[in-house]
Amino acid sequence: MEYQNPQSSADVRAEAALSQPTASGRTIISETAVAKVAGIAARAVPGVYSLGTGSSRALGAIRDAVGSSDHAAGVHAEVGETQVAVDITLVAAYGTPLHSLANQVRAAVYAAVEKLVGLQVIEVNVEINDVYIAPPPKPLGAPAVTEREAVL
């Protein structure tokens, strides 16, 4: 019986290319860059309301108001030579099955980081720290009464 390697030859070549220094220099990928890629991938999953803790989301709202955004909010990445570990804190939309959401986020982050960054993802830890409940919709037929009109 002949042993079959579970990794494809493309995977082996990619790992070898990452671990061997080239004659033209080396590439360093920062934790911030990996965190942004992971954050964008996580936000794209249906059922993710936002990323980060309450205080980081408040700061993000201020940042959004002035036209800036932090795609790495709620994401922490630890980058090694060829591997990366990612921690994500998120808020789920009410009605979304939480375990399923965590698995979808994990899969999206694995795929995005390995494809775009080229590092092997060893783990993606997902912490769901809140559930967003949308406010009830306002009735369409009722006229809006301002405070000033109510006084008159």
Image (cartoon, rainbow, N blue to C red):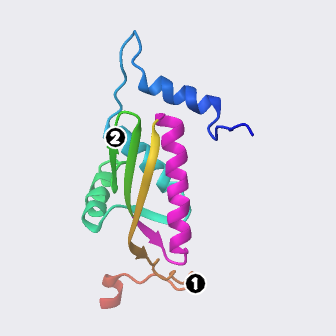
Nearest the viewer among 125 and 61 is: 125
Which residue: 48% across, 42% down? 113
Which residue: 29% across, 49% down? 66
Image vertical order of residue 14 relative to residue 130, above or below = above
Mark 2 lies on residue: 79
Give percent across and percent down for residue 135: 45, 80
What kind of element bears circle 2?
Answer: strand
Image vertical order of residue 144 relative to residue 17, above or below = below
* Front tag of 2 and 1: 2
| Callout 1 amino acid | Gly
Image vertical order of residue 133 relative to residue 114, above or below = below
Sequence-wise, which precedes: disc 2 or disc 1? 2
Which residue: 33% across, 61% down? 52
Residue 104 falls left or right of residue 126 = right
**Magenta stretch mostly in which secondary structure?**
helix
- In this view of the protein, can residue 152 be seen by the observer? no
Residue 131: mark:
none
Give percent across and percent down for residue 107: 55, 54
Give percent across and percent down for residue 58: 27, 63
Residue 64 falls left or right of residue 110 = left
Neighbourhood count class around disc 1 (C-alpha, 10 Å): few under 14, some 14–19, many 20 upward: few
Q: Residue furthest right?
A: 1
Mark 1 lies on residue: 141
Image vertical order of residue 15 relative to residue 126, above or below = above
Q: Residue furthest front?
A: 1
* 69 drawn magenta: no
On the image, which quarter does residue 97 sit in? Answer: bottom right
| Callout 2 amino acid | Val
Magenta stretch, residue numbers: 90-118
Nearest the viewer among 13 and 59 is: 13
